[in-house]
Image: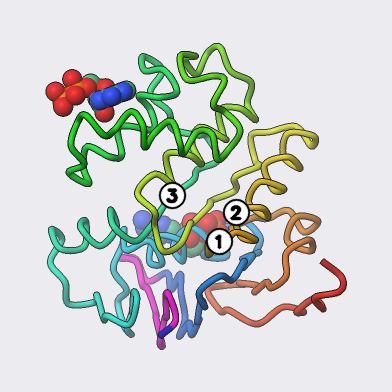
Amino acid sequence: APVLELRGVSKSYTGGVKALDSVDLELGEGEMLGIVGPSGSGKSTLLNVMGTLDRASEGEVLVGGMDVSTFSDRLLSTVRAQAIGFVFQQFHLNDTYNALQNVAVGLQYAKVPRRDRQAIATAALETVRMGHRLDHQPHQLSGGEKQRVAIARALVNKPKYLLADEPTGALDSENGAAVMELFGELNQQGMTVVIITHDLEIADSLPRRVEIRDGVLRAGATRKASAR
Ligand code: ADP
Ligand code: ADP
């Protein structure tokens, strides 16, 4: 089964805006997918539905083959904790924690014993080449470094897929490129990655992309493997 599948998903907000209109989307294991669209096109709504943070008004959302449309909020939060890693534009790190603690937080919810958290969080930070910054607090890190810590936090529970919402939006082009390179490496290692962006250059660098406009999704050009 695909890691994630949307079947005929629509989302209407009170007031009548149809933010998603009959969206079909399959995300295969090991894929790296870009979702592009202008402001107001429905990207955040789509991300929220893909992340089970928000419910579709119509249609089915299948995570690992399970239709989660009918799950309780409590069950959904368990699915999220076990299956999905989130990365945000503004990092959302806790400024009073160091890098290690910021990553370890995610393990608490996954009921990982306290004695194991440090080693697992350290390993996640080493994966994003932040093993030398364990004791640094966010204000002591560059934007690119902060995003790498946030990516380590997203990875620490070994999710089935990563959802990144404008992950380079707060970074200069050099740090943005480095973060995109990191996503590429993680994908090479087998991680399934979704990048939401309005940056066409970034979208263009991804092996597969879809475009959203007024809530309607359509396939973008698929790049040849040789062009990667
Ligand atoms: P994007 O992330 O691409 O900017 P959004 O998903 O945020 O797009 O919004 C898609 C459409 O849905 C827009 O017309 C927006 O105004 C509307 N919308 C988003 N959130 C809400 C909400 N909570 N209530 C009503 N309308 C909303
Ligand atoms: P709690 O009592 O709520 O479990 P802790 O005292 O365990 O909180 O930890 C305080 C914060 O530090 C928590 O956010 C936690 O995620 C984080 N943390 C817990 N264990 C470790 C660890 N071994 N190394 C780094 N940070 C940790």
Which residue in the structure is indicated by mark 2?
A: 186
Three-letter amino acid code of the residue under disc 2: Leu
Closer to the chain start, of discs 1 and 2, is 2
Instruction: Indicate which label's residue lies in the foreground, 2 or 3.
Output: 2
Please report whichever mark, 2 or 3, sits nearer to the chain's N-terminal start: 3
Looking at the picture, does residue 88 appear above or below residue 208? above
- Where 91 falls versus 227 (above or below)? above
- Circles 1, 3 touching at the beta carbon (< 8 Å): no
Give the mark, 1 or 3, whose residue is nearer the N terminus.
Answer: 3
Residue occupying image coordinates x 80% and y 34%: 174
Q: In this view, does 97 lie above or below 103?
A: above
> For this rendering, which residue is in front, 145 or 74?
145
Question: Disc 1, disc 2: CB below 8 Å?
Answer: yes
* Residue 210 location, quadrant: bottom right
Residue 109 screen position, x and y as percent? 21, 42
Left or right: 221 with respect to 71? right
Circle number at residue 86? 3
Q: Distance between the residues labelled 2 and 3?
A: 14 Å
Mark 3: amino acid: Phe
* Image quadrant in which the N terminus is located: bottom left
Going by the numbered disc 1, the residue's amino acid type is Val
